[in-house]
Amino acid sequence: MIKQAIIPLAGLGTRLLPLTSVFAKELLPINGKPGIEYILEECIDAGITEIIFIISKKKQMIKNYFYNDNFYKKIIKKKKDPRIIKEYNKIIKYKKMIKFVYQNNPRGTGDAVLKTKKYIKDKFFLMLLPDDLIINKNCSKSLVNIHNHYKTSVMASMNVNKKTVSRWGIYKLGKKVDKKNYFIEDVIEKPSIKKAPSNKAVIGRYILPKSIFSKLDKQKSGKGGEIHITDAIQSLIKNNYKFIAHNFSGKYLDCGSMNGYIKSSLEISKK
Ligand code: G1P
């Protein structure tokens, strides 16, 4: 059973400047609701009971969002507005499930994952990258189901335009598992078009094994001087760990870029 999820939230969000110069991108509203709440809903609906947020001092505002009880209590006492009461109850529910750990130097997703090492209890856990919003179908739930069936690690995947491979983790397709799932033979972080083994990208939903921590302990920095989760996954694959790429059926929205962020509100408002 996958019960714990981790969410790296210490990134600077430079692709969303100027919106992110004083504001955490994960709290920016998408159709009237902070992006992070969509991610939390996905987790909870997928059966997750504990969520670890990796934040930084600069992103303390994310913790404040869930710890603003006195403010809510005062307002509710005065106004008794059912909408506010409902919102506050939702925030209390989330707060009870979230643990905060800190990554004060944004040294990459791999480094963020390493910060959660002592909190992970089971053999596998879920990771969600909050820039990647997937709507219409719960992608985490699909990964959990695949994991329960095959007992392996799983990552979300989609085909991307060949010209954009250097934006993603790209993998080489291995043996077919079933219609929507394939084993991964190799995975490379942000390869050049020349070095890319395919146009199949990893999207920000992963079921990772606890053994990833022993790789991350030794992981050297890679592309752009960052410690990448992709490099640690590649090391595990080379040690015969099985990773399945799942071609998810939901719609992908890239909320980490300005264009994608604007589009995501439009898409969600159509639902
Ligand atoms: C991260 C991962 C990359 C993956 C991408 C999906 O990149 O490192 O492998 O393809 O998320 O969005 P980032 O968006 O942090 O540059």
Image (cartoon, helix red, strand yellow):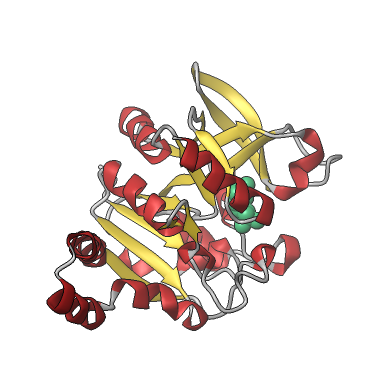
What is the quadrant of residue 87 in the picture?
bottom left
Q: Residue at x 25, y 42 (%)?
A: 1
Q: Is residue 103 left or right of residue 158?
A: left
Q: Position of residue 71 (x, y in %)?
A: 25, 81
Q: Residue at x 64, y 28 (%)?
A: 173
Q: Residue at x 38, y 36 (%)?
A: 138
Q: Residue furthest right?
A: 194
Quadrant for the C terminus, please. Answer: top left
Number of numbered markers: 0
Q: Position of residue 86 (x, y in %)?
A: 20, 59
Q: Is residue 105 left or right of residue 95?
A: right
Nearer-the-camera pick, 63 or 28: 28
Q: Position of residue 67 (x, y in %)?
A: 28, 77
Q: Is residue 239 left or right of residue 4?
A: right
Residue 26 visible here: yes
Nearer-the-camera pick, 100 or 213: 100
Q: Residue at x 73, y 60 (%)?
A: 223
Nearer-the-camera pick, 220 or 201: 201
What is the quadrant of residue 229 in the picture?
bottom right
Vertical arrangement, residue 238 with respect to residue 217, above or below:
above
Nearer-the-camera pick, 114 or 140: 140
Q: Position of residue 76 (x, y in %)?
A: 17, 74
Residue 190 visible here: no
Q: Residue furthest top?
A: 179
